[in-house]
Amino acid sequence: MTNVTSEEFLTKLFSVVYKLYTIAKTQSDRLKKEWDENFASLPEQPHLVRSVRAEKEKFLTDIDYRIKVLNTIKLSFEDGFHSIKKILTALYNSYFMESEVFTQNFVREDQKSLKYLVAKEILGNLIQYNQLDHETVPLKYNILARIYLLIKFKEQSATSINQNLKKININLKLPALKRILNEIVADGFLKKTKVGKHIYYGLPQELELSEKGKPTYNQTIRPLVDWPTLFYRSYYNVRELNVTVNGDCKYPEFLNKVLLKAATQGYTACHYVFKNLVKYYEKLKEEG
């Protein structure tokens, strides 16, 4: 781990602040554009990520200003979570609910596939997000998204699937899970195989749209479906702050413990780092 002075750390912190501003601005503009093009007829509005373009000199020298900027970034991490949740809400509460724009763009076969495919592309990619939000998307789509790669390579029993779902905080009784798995089988996206007394679940085929549906998907909602993964992996990454600040600052043990968390990507780690950086500088301000 890199060792830096407190002055070097502040400069590094500002560079991360500026990076996050750039990502938030660019990605919010992109989200708004795609939303307006595809979801304008839906009742939901996008939740955009706030951004703050901090002044470098003021950030480095004015502790009140620094605290304000760091607080804004902490809130922007929360915005990012709600941006993804709002995309999922718009898709599963409005777009997929027989909306005119959906039924006109996709044939019946693709309408069914798309509900599973979108869950796989968003929730299947964002396990950390799914640990925090597993209520927005109906369970059967969420479950297939979670186990898709697992059963793609090896058929699984209901018990092993249930254990896997617990990792994203979905806790179901086995009979309830089996009922949902049977729904997915009835939809044609899972198959059951009996080996002796045991039943295993696998994929009947790859989860894909029809040849007609693929270009339509690419030209319509795919950018909105791809947005959460691209945003999450770029925004919730502050690894540059995973440094050790030398003992020329106050409370180096606390500060360095906080910065250790920066090594981990994801909403929870980033929110923790900035929440505690705010606490750190508030404490320094109190002591004058």
Image (cartoon, helix red, strand yellow):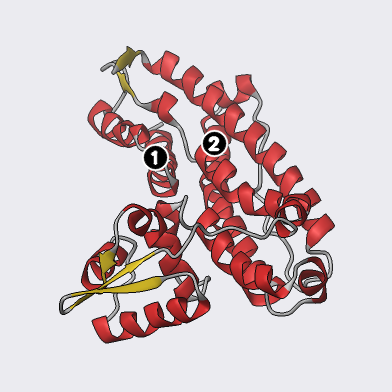
**In the image, what residue type sits under mark 2?**
Ser
Q: Residue furthest left?
A: 197
Tell me: 79 left or right of 242. right
Tell which of 207 and 249 is nearer to you. Answer: 207
Q: Earlier in the sequence, mark 2 or mark 1?
A: 2
Q: Position of residue 158 (x, y in %)?
A: 26, 73
**Who's the residue at 62% across and 21% down the image?**
56
In the rendering, which numbered label is found on residue 273?
A: 1
> Residue at 58% across / 53% down in the picture?
79
Residue 191 spot, x, y in % from top left: 39, 72
Q: Residue at x 53, y 55 (%)?
A: 122
Is disc 2 placed on a helix, strand or loop?
Answer: helix
Q: Quadrant of residue 93?
A: bottom right
What's the distance in space between the residues labelled 2 and 1, CA to CA? 16 Å
- Look at the picture and state if 8 lies above or below 202: above
Kind of residue at disc 1:
Val
Which residue is labeled 2 in the image?
234
Q: Is residue 36 visible?
A: yes
Name the quadrant containing residue 36: bottom right
Instruction: Please identify the quadrant where the N terminus is shown.
Output: top left
Count numbered badges in the picture.
Answer: 2
- Quadrant (top left, top right, bottom left, bottom right) of the C terminus: top left
